[in-house]
Amino acid sequence: MICAPSFLSSNFSKLKVEILSINHAKWLHFDVMDGKFVENKTYNHEILTEIGQYSNQIFDCHLMVENPEKDIDNYAKNGADYITFHYEATKDSKKLISKIQSVNVKAGISIKPATDVEVLDDFLEDIDLILIMSVEPGKGGQKFMENALDKIRYLDHLRKEKGYHFLIEVDGGINFDTAKLVKKAGADIIVVGSYIFNRNNRNDIIREFENV
Ligand code: DX5
Ligand code: ZN
């Protein structure tokens, strides 16, 4: 499994130390919240430049923002490798996917727990990554919602049948028990926030998640 730590639950007053404490991870998950699509507000594209000074990890940007169209160029310019928007935040997912890919960034689409996975059917051929939320977006430390498993199984079955190339990423409430469940269901990438940042031996924990 790929383990993408989310530093949402990290100590922002010592961000560099916190990011270096998870330097074994190949991916880094940025939880961008605008205070409109979700209640909380976190950071914007500028954080990629800051962290890019001491990290060459894959920047996996999860945009929990209203009309994400406005942000694509900034995230692309600041070093995003993946830009994932929410299906629920745009009127034209297909157009947004091509916009992201046109600026040489991989396109991801995410659905909230209450959104049916079938809404993604039209995008599966083109999309690079699908982010299945196993918690309500907006904060860390929540409990894993099991309805994510059927969505993962549905997508994994379809991509095997049709030969689609997208990756399946799962986000929210991941610990070693739920990591095993989502891997079995077909997930490729797990986002882990509080489970890592509430502990000290972080790189060891990441290695363990990679070998789930
Ligand atoms: C929630 C974020 C998640 C969250 C994961 O809106 O998208 O990435 O930070 O945190 P944990 O692992 O604590 O659920
Ligand atoms: Zn996230």
Image (cartoon, grey):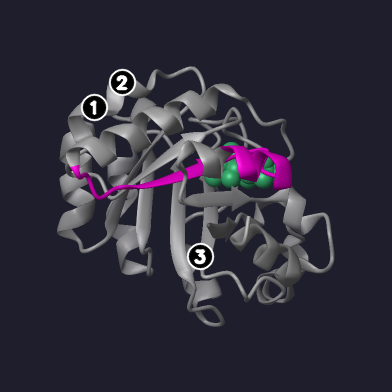
Image location of residue 95, percent across then percent down: 16, 38
Residue 118 is marked as 2
- Vertically, is 202 above or below 8? below
- The type of residue carrying mark 1 is Asp
In this view of the protein, can residue 45 be seen by the observer? no
Distance from Cα at disc 1 to Cα at disc 2 = 5 Å
- The type of residue carrying mark 2 is Glu
Q: Residue at x 61, y 30 (%)?
A: 135
Could you tell me which quadrant the C terminus lies in? bottom right
Asked if labels 2 and 3 touch by Cβ distance under 8 angstroms, the answer is: no
- The residue under label 3 is 27
Image location of residue 66, percent across then percent down: 40, 33
Q: Quadrant of residue 206?
A: bottom right
Q: Residue at x 57, y 50 (%)?
A: 191
Q: Quadrant of residue 178?
A: top right
**Which mark is first along the chain, 1 or 3?**
3
**Which mark is first along the chain, 2 or 3?**
3
Q: Residue at x 45, y 51 (%)?
A: 188
Image location of residue 151, percent across then percent down: 43, 27
Element type where label 2 sits in the image: helix
- Vertically, is 11 above or below 148? below
Asked if labels 2 and 1 touch by Cβ distance under 8 angstroms, the answer is: yes
Q: Is residue 80 shown left or right of residue 172?
A: left
Image location of residue 147, percent across then percent down: 55, 21
- The residue under label 1 is 121
Residue 176 lies in the magenta stretch: yes
Region in magenta: 163-181
Distance from Cα at disc 3 to Cα at disc 1 = 26 Å
Element type where label 3 sits in the image: strand
In this view of the protein, can residue 93 be seen by the observer? yes
Q: Residue at x 20, y 61 (%)?
A: 103
Camera-side residue of 171 and 74: 171
